[in-house]
Amino acid sequence: MKVVELVESQIAYGGSPAELHLNHRYLTMSQILSALAYYWDGKQELDAEIKRRKEYVKQAEIEAGESPFAARLRAQGLLPL
């Protein structure tokens, strides 16, 4: 797991390092605390990476368009217009 992924998880769901550990049991508490310390030491650079990732996802969603499944649900009135 990358540091930015752990930080994104914390941003999305909130929580303490202990709660992160509950959701990511394959990481030790030391690894989590080290990752968070690394983030705070390079916060500006890592925040820019998080922003870049979000922009990439938005662009990919725009380029992909609506899925056929979502279109069928929308046609049936099961998704909002």
Image: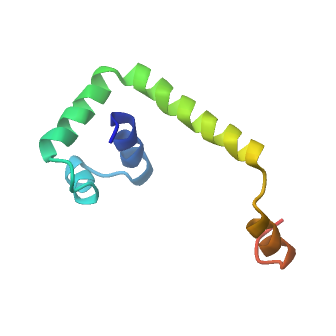
Judged left or right of residue 53, residue 61 is right
Image x and y of residue 45, in percent: 42, 20
The residue nearer to you, when weighing 54 against 43, is 54
Q: Residue at x 62, y 34 (%)?
A: 55
Up/down of 72 relative to 51, above or below: below
Q: Relative to residue 48, is residue 67 depicted above or below? A: below
Toward the right, the furthest residue is 75
- For the rendered model, the colour scheme is rainbow
Residue at the (81%, 73%) spot, across then down: 72
Q: Position of residue 32 (x, y in %)?
A: 21, 42
The C terminus is located in which quarter? Answer: bottom right
Q: Quadrant of the N terminus?
A: top left
Give the x, y percent position of residue 66.
78, 57
| Tally of numbered discs | 0
In which quarter of the view is residue 58 placed?
A: top right
The residue shown at (44%, 50%) is 12
Seen in the picture, residue 42 relative to 12 is either above or below; the reply is above
Image side of residue 56 versus residue 2, left or right: right
Identify the residue at image location x=31%, y=29%.
39
> Is residue 16 shown left or right of residue 59?
left
Task: Decide which of 72, 77 is in the foreground and name it.
Answer: 72
Where in the figure is residue 21, as x and y percent of width and height? 22, 53
